[in-house]
Image (cartoon, helix red, strand yellow):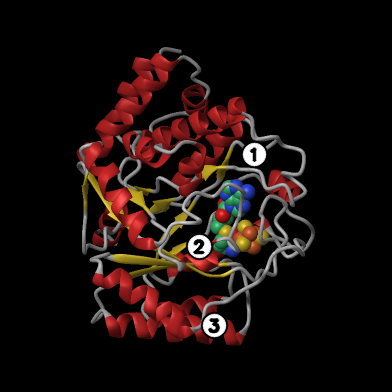
Amino acid sequence: MELQKIIDKAKIAPRRLSPRELEYLLSLESEEEQQLLFDAAYQVKLAYIGRKVSLRGLIEMGNICAKDCLYCGIRRGNGAVHRFELDLDAVERMARWAYEHNYGSLVLQAGEVESEKRTELVEAALRRIMKLSNGELGVTLSLGEQRDEVYRRWHAAGARRYLLRIETSSPDFYRKLHPDGHSFFRRRRCLYVLRKLGYQVGSGVMIGLPGQTAAQLARDLRFFARADLDMIGMGPYLPHHATPLGRDIELTPIYRRRQLMLGLKTVAACRLYLHDVNIAATTALQALAPDGRERGLLAGANVVMPNITDTCYRKDYFLYENKPGSDENSAESLAAFERSIAKIGEDILWGEHGDSKHYLSRTATE
Ligand code: SAH
Ligand code: SF4
């Protein structure tokens, strides 16, 4: 296969690449070829989005979780975690800070809790955020699998986007990453329900999981196309020593570099394949290299989610270890972030929702 031919084909229109071509892109090893891939993806991003970065202020609302995902540091089975849940006033304070600092949108994320109390807390938080911002802040939720009715109530209270990573599009592999009681099929169904309810729907996978192949990742990208997703959030897998999956993995420089490069290649292949979706440059990229998020933006991503949770809670929300920014406060993070975005020649879309272009065009024709 020839790289330039695949790139040319990908640029003509979205969704043209075959599984083998996607796998080829993800398997590129030479630095020169990887750079060609990143540059091509960046050009596609320029055509649809421009040199623009959308911001979402991330509020980590709580780490109580009913799930036991084998990779995650705040899984139920990790008894060493100090559990917390923000109250309504704390969420409102952080949201107000974001609004006053000209953020256009927020993400409320937490471990998975299915209860009437949690449903009401989120509903009340959404109402307060709508009120304090005169309905201007766009809110994304990332609160796991829920009953249809709960998703409907949160939409009615003002949530407009939902992030629920499928983690892997293979039911067999999913079973290996999750213990009994977790269901790939329920998770996948949630994505369809969210879409039917009118949300902008985001999903994604972890990149570089133990046992994952490039062919599998290529199939994940095809899944994103089939599910007609509006937003993609993918990040490299990072080990946590207190989890079954990460217990024996050593974060050597070689491992870090491999995870980073695979992460960037997957972002770029995704942009080349899907064209008009929002793609996040995730914190996990930044965990692998100080400029990981900026490199993600230069490989085709267009969304960054700076953490705006109060610093005192951050050490309790370690999905993986060595999470960056855990000792910074939101203002420090923001100042450093602004400088780094200016350095790569991109502009931050202050005060804008930054809706997915894909969502806007699919709903315009519906
Ligand atoms: N509980 C919710 C939201 C919080 S977890 C949910 O699971 O949907 C958000 C994401 O963190 C997960 O979807 C997963 O992809 C990612 N994550 C968890 N553990 C991780 C790890 N060790 N390395 C990288 N990403 C991880
Ligand atoms: Fe809970 Fe989400 Fe972590 Fe799974 S990935 S254990 S659902 S917080």
Q: Return the residue at label 1.
A: 209
Dot placed on the residue nearer the N-terminal end, 2 or 3: 3
Residue 340 visible from this viewpoint: yes
Q: Which residue is mark 2?
A: 192
Q: Image check: 44 left or right of 197?
A: left
The spot of residue 155 in percent (x, y) is 41, 77
Mark 1 to mark 3 CA distance (whole Å): 32 Å
Q: Position of residue 242 (x, y in %)?
A: 74, 52
Considering depth in this image, is 188 or 250 the residue closer to the camera? 250
Residue at disc 1, secondary structure: loop
Q: Which residue is mark 3?
A: 119
Percent position of residue 288, x then y = 51, 37
Q: Toward the viewer: 101 or 15?
A: 101
Front one among 18 and 333: 333
Left of 37 or right of it: where is 150?
right
**Alpha carbon distance from label 2 to label 3:** 20 Å
